[in-house]
Amino acid sequence: MSRISDEPVVLATGGAGFIGSHIVVELLNNGFSVVVIDNLVNALKGNDGGPKPESLRRVEKITNKTVTFYNVDLLDIDALKSVFLKHNIVCVIHFAALKAVGESCEIPLTYYKNNVMGSINLLEVMKEFNVKKLLFSSSATVYGLPQKLPLTEDHPTGQGCTNPYGKTKYFIEEILQDLCASDKTWSVVALRYFNPIGAHKSGLIGEDPNGIPSNLMPYIAQVATGKRAELKVYGNDYDTLDGTGVRDYIHIVDLAEGHISGMKKVMDKAFSGWRVYNLGTGTGYSVLQIVHEFESASGKKVPYSIVERRPGDVASSYADPTRAKKELQWTAKRTLSDMCQDTWKWQSQNPNGFKG
Amino acid sequence: MSRISDEPVVLATGGAGFIGSHIVVELLNNGFSVVVIDNLVNALKGNDGGPKPESLRRVEKITNKTVTFYNVDLLDIDALKSVFLKHNIVCVIHFAALKAVGESCEIPLTYYKNNVMGSINLLEVMKEFNVKKLLFSSSATVYGLPQKLPLTEDHPTGQGCTNPYGKTKYFIEEILQDLCASDKTWSVVALRYFNPIGAHKSGLIGEDPNGIPSNLMPYIAQVATGKRAELKVYGNDYDTLDGTGVRDYIHIVDLAEGHISGMKKVMDKAFSGWRVYNLGTGTGYSVLQIVHEFESASGKKVPYSIVERRPGDVASSYADPTRAKKELQWTAKRTLSDMCQDTWKWQSQNPNGFKG
């Protein structure tokens, strides 16, 4: 096997998923060439019958550019190596992960295997091919129960992280820090996502969950289209403005732009080692605020009922985004109204997601 | 491939190493049949030229019983499965791990891969073969910097755990807890070792480190035989009785007996889920106390020099062993003098360890 091109490319693991596909759009728009690997557990194959997932077909339509795609699982180390042999990879963005909090409590070994072993495999192959620039997709879940709000990057991590999904992100962060401490030639930036929602303004790509959505926004969107009867709101007796949980929702395209800034940091010759950034707006909204904003964006009613709190849920969580602003010159620009409008555009244009 | 015997056996991963071999002796003496797998990175092949490691040859000599051995690495999942196919495994004791703190800081990925991925592989194979009883070899390292002494099992873990070796033990504990929470048919006991030293009273088995010993006792023993010129003592200005670091040293045979008690707990039909126990004496000794006790046990001088503190070392660490006493009816019985005498017997009878 030999190189099929010497063109410098960014490798995006899990690049066919909701977050990945939006970031691939921004990468292409910013002049990067992109190779995506994905095992397609969170994405659908192409409607044209080809192997390329529909999300990436849409990305190509939006950008009028081409994405190279391989159906590769990070647990298949030989398949992974073959991608590094074929392409001149200069940087890796690592999104690939199982991501459902509830499911992670039911099948923890599967989560640890996929997320942690998958990441270790990726790092070993990167090391073998001397590719030592990595942008890692982490999560605000690593903070566990907030001791203080807003959450800054130096808030303790790992403690009170109540689900295996969150722990996999925390474990990988720890592994990356130890790796950077042992070998100063690595440059690793981790981005801790708050709650990405919304969709690309074209309405061509968006969140397309398997089965019953486990996140709030796609659930609301499916209620608005009539696919689900009503939204369950888990508790309205929290110490918040209206009693429902408050989270820091961030527009997926703002998040994607944050990755371009993060990439520049990773590729900066003056940078090496480990650095972590929150990607959030700094503003929290309650579940009911989202519901009402979505109703006005969509012109649809979103019926809901209040049910019991879920164990492990906290009242409020939101970011201090100062570090990313200072060091990456990045801030979230889009409003809650943008988030709801763009979600609605995607959902109403694609009531069955990427399915034909 | 099919069963070569229906006899119920205990599988000991890493059973050819220092800790493993002593526990295999106690298992055999207590009527258990034992199958050992080991990749032999921390043990030597047999002096008779056969595949069975010398440590297990000696175990057989001590007990006058036979141990079945396979040279299997936990990262080789097919080889691992073949052992589960061949034997009627009723319980697993999982010692296998890379264990050098200093080395773990230099090659963290290797440590995470071997220890964490190796453990996940083991758990997946156990699940596949419906073997859900596990005794896990953990470490007091998971406590990190002690917030309060003596260390009880509910002391926070993971935070301030400054080296990748310790983190691998912490990660595996977390994975095991999540696994037990997800599936109530598992029975898992983790034993947090303090500082096991000493050797079997026969002098036939003991600690035989590769290269320069990274633990205190084998280093002292090699200084006493003249193999090393002098001991380096890392700091004599700690807040302890003589300024040198205080640790909870436990005789390896006491530790082994603790495993028999732990095994009984794991095999108890009334027990399921996750439980963790300290294995320590509850008494701390300083580096210089060990040196002086070793000198009187061996009749040899142990020259030493004081050098700078090592980053990450704490002044004192010792166990509260109450829980193991109450719930496992186990306590350490052997004295510091026993530990030094037995180490010396092993070292003086085997100046080159297991090497012919």
Image: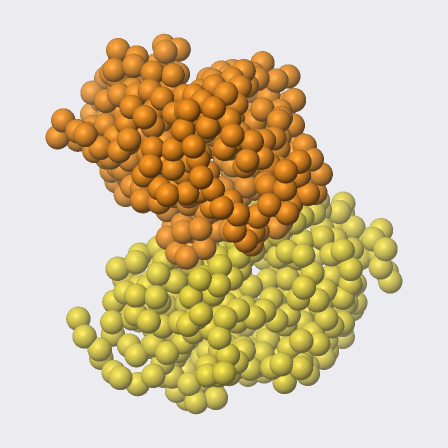
Chain colours: A yellow, B orange
Say whether residue A144 is left or right of residue A64: right
Task: Please tell me whether residue B7 is drawn above or below residue A337 in the rendered image.
Answer: above
User: Residue drawn 50% across and 83% down?
Assistant: A270
In this rendered view, identify the residue nearer to me: B55 or B37. Answer: B55
Q: How many marks?
A: 0
Residue at 56 percent of width and 70 percent of height = A275
Figure check: A59 above or below B21? below
As drawn, A18 above or below B210: below
- The quadrant of the image that shows the C terminus of chain B is top left
Residue B152, given in percent of the width and then of the height, sits at: 66, 32
Q: In terms of depth relative to the viewer, which is nearer, B4 or B242?
A: B242
Of B47 and A112, nearer the camera is B47
Q: In which image quadrant can residue B48 be found?
A: top left
Q: Residue at x 26, y 33 (%)?
A: B352
Q: Residue at x 64, y 17 (%)?
A: B326
Q: Is residue B60 visible?
A: yes
On the image, the x and y values in percent for residue A206 come to 54, 72
Q: Quadrant of the N terminus of chain B?
A: top left
Percent coordinates x, y for residue B306 in the rendering: 53, 47
Residue B11, visible in the rendered structure: no
